[in-house]
Amino acid sequence: MHPAFCTFTCHFYEPLLDEDITKYLLTSEQLCRVMPSAFDSEKARRQAFEAIFGSLDMKLQSHVEFYISPKVSQVSAVVESGGTTDVVKTINYGGGHLALILEEFKVESTGDAYMRICRSYEVLCGDAKNESLLKFGNPTFLLCILGPYLMVCGAVKRENVHVEPLTPLLPMFPGFGTEGRVMQLAHCLRALKEGTDKLREFWQDVGIIKDANEMVTADSLPEPYLVSGCPDNGLLRFDDWRGTFESRMRDRNDSNKHPNFLAKIRKGDECEKQVVVKFVYNYSGTYSTAVHEYLHSIGLAPALYLVKPLHRGLVMVVMEYLRPEDGTGGWVELDKFEGSLNTKEHVVREKLEMIIKRLQKQKMVHADLRPTNIMIKVDGKGDMMIDENEPILSVVDFDWAGRAGEVCYQPLLNPNVPWPTGAKAYKEIGQDDDRVLLDNWWGAFVEVKTAK
């Protein structure tokens, strides 16, 4: 993930500062009042959006001059074709176009704004005549506006075009109070302002334009933007470990999942190990190494090899791979366990209660102890393995974990999860929240699993 996109993600999840609340909330409220209206054309919707958006000094057709050579002209390209409108915030530097924001407007029933803007970005990269621009990845923010809905993505060009959704689809509808849709959109606007500022700084720092259009080479890209360990080149290097990425683990189109990769690593003459490489981005920019390592020390979590902050809001985590069941036994998520709990219901519950008690004794919380984050070991027939009258369990995903009363809930909580009463964005996670969450989902889960 490019530093500008990390900045966006971090600010999207952080609380709004007092000095920001009025500005971003007023703009958000205006968008939520105006954008649900019926517009005669996509062009009319774009004009209404930009008229309000401009109050944040982020007019999509204006540009920042401080890193542009005086001899270089500025242009804003508005391209209308096939019933669609693409607005490109660009800088013309003698033959190529450097885009900061690309946006696509579609009415609700005329097509997929996401696919259209991905294609527009691909075309933009094809038009980038300066080789240095593409060597830097040509990072660009993509705004998809489908009727009264907004989604922000980040795009980069390597060998192929990569587009990562940075937000869910955000409704621009009036809401009651300031903690719902209006506040969520305000967070998005603030994050976009900070992210584009970071993108401007990036192009200034790398000196993509020097004295009358003299272009730099990719070799001069500063070290903070060369992220070691990322899978762009297929290599994984940290401490004394050396390895290579093998494959993507999860569907890249699922924006609710962190990007996970499989890799193989080796230290010296030791045997090769298969690991999971997970890129976590959240508003706190942390990962609970302490909780993960504690549960591993008592045999209740996979081995942890590395937790490395890459940029503000982005952390790379390397951990043991719990190989899935393949006919000879292995690990499966409790949520995907296809067998029947039957008489094992009580021993599973007791094991989970034991895990919570161990955490509470250390004044720790996992904060997301659900079936998707609990792994169980099964035999070759898919039956749950029992060792000394206990199921073999392992807890994963420590993104929210930490010290009880210190860590907080994330801003966007999945409404389909039965969170503890009172759980909301930025609220401190209490000592007993793990047990309350377990109580809330356990009954329905057991009903489904024992019916098999």
Image (cartoon, grey):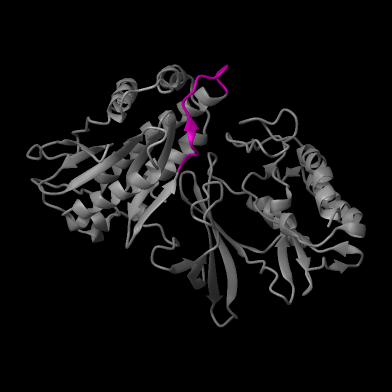
Q: Is residue 92 above or below residue 307?
A: above
Residue occupying the point 67% across, 38% down: 416
User: The C terminus is located in which quarter?
Assistant: bottom right
Side of 180 relative to 293 (left or right): left
Q: Where is residue 381 in the image (x, y as percent from the top left)?
A: 79, 73
Q: In which quarter of the image is residue 23?
A: top left
Q: In this view, does 272 lie above or below 235?
A: below
Q: 301 or 205, which is in the foreground? A: 301
Residue occupying the point 34% across, 39% down: 198
Residue occupying the point 45% across, 42% down: 166
Q: Is residue 111 above or below residue 451?
A: above
Q: In which quarter of the image is residue 428?
A: top right
Side of 65 relative to 324 (left or right): left
Side of 385 relative to 54 (left or right): right
Q: 100 or 237, which is in the foreground? A: 100
Within the magenta stretch, is there residue 392? Answer: no
Q: 267 or 254, which is in the foreground? A: 254
- Count of marks placed on residues: 0
Q: Where is residue 182 in the image (x, y as percent from the top left)?
A: 50, 23
Q: In this view, does 446 lie above or below 108?
A: below
| Magenta highlight: main SS | loop
Side of 447 relative to 335 (left or right): right
Q: Quadrant of residue 325?
A: bottom right
Q: Give the range drawn in magenta.
A: 166-179
Q: 357 or 361, which is in the foreground? A: 357
Residue occupying the point 57% across, 17% down: 176
Q: Where is residue 180 in the image (x, y as percent from the top left)?
A: 56, 24
